[in-house]
Amino acid sequence: MNWYLQSGKESDVVTSTRIRFARNLPEFKFNLKEKKDVDKLKNKIKENVYAIGYGLKYLELKDMDDITKMSLVEKNLISPEYAMHNENGAILINDEENICIMINDEDHLKIQVFSSGLELENTLNYAIELDQKIEEVLGYATSKKYGYLTSMPTNWGTGLKASVMVHLPALTITKNINKVFYTINNFGVNIVGAYGENSKELGDVFQISNKRTLGVTEKEIIENIKVEKLIEQERKARKFLAKDTIDLEDTIYRSYGLLNNCRKISLEEAQKLISNVKMGTDLGVLPELNDRKIQQLILYTKPANMQ
């Protein structure tokens, strides 16, 4: 089963983990624009897919229709900008879809490894193993002083972006979300919508990731993503809501009833109602569903995956 349909550690609050490395090949200019240069890059990668291994397949974005590309966006495997505005893009992806490598984004390679739940350390170890194999096969642009070189100096050093998706309905309902985010911001992390910068929050889901990549190790980066306090705050807020049992059950079962019986619904409303239902399932208030069914609902109510 694909990782995004599974539940994992702390999955009542942390729905998924992603480790991403930005990498560039030394013989090509950074941030390639000319088609002939991009084709050379893609051909080199394509010729070496078998040598890299991991069951990866090479797919061109130009060979996909818009629905297929958006289905990958909805799974958070590629970014919306990359899907819609990169005619020369391609990906390496395995059947489980827990590995997705974007080719010719602002960097030559964006190596991504995904897990369900809170799995920063295990996902990082697997991503490092994959990264080392690709470096062995393709080689990377590096500097003794600055580490891995990327098109954006802010990503120099490790080139690592570690992120977790968090589901925070109770903090949203109790209007404590902004206060908690303000506190977390002071720890040197970014908090954005589910689909990255400039995307809005959908279904009370937010993405938390590191700001620094230079002058810190990979291990230090994942240690600085302190979500344990956030998990604790969300669970406290849920307990507070559960004190008024009738109101909480009413919110959850109204949401469940609307999802069961409506004939037409917007994505935004559906995701908000599913957020309430997930909270109810995680609290044991709603025995009619389980976590796997919730994960299916979250994904298959999104337009492209529904189609």
Image: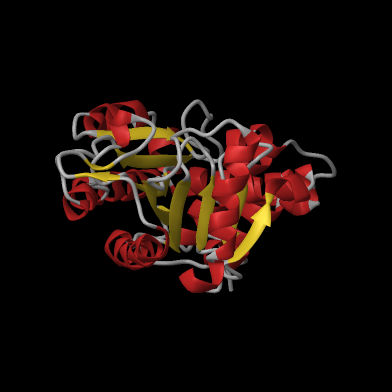
Relative to 151, say whether 66 is above or below.
below
Of residues 294 and 26, the one nearer the viewer is 26
Query: Picture quarter containing residue 135?
Result: bottom left
Residue drawn at (57%, 67%) of the image: 94
* Image position, residue 164 (x, y; %): 38, 49
Relative to 85, say whether 74 is above or below.
below
* Image position, residue 96 (x, y; %): 57, 70
Q: Residue furthest right?
A: 263
Residue drawn at (22%, 33%) of the image: 188
Determine if residue 135 is in view. yes
Relative to 136, say whether 106 is above or below.
above
* Image position, residue 180 (x, y; %): 28, 33
Determine if residue 53 is in view. no
Residue drawn at (19%, 55%) of the image: 219
Indicate the quadrant containing the N terminus: top left, top right, bottom left or bottom right: bottom right
Query: Picture quarter containing residue 39?
Result: top right
Residue drawn at (52%, 68%) of the image: 6
* Image position, residue 277 (x, y; %): 57, 52
Of residues 71 and 157, the one nearer the viewer is 157
Of residues 56 and 260, the one nearer the viewer is 56
What colour scheme was applied to this rendering of the protein? secondary structure
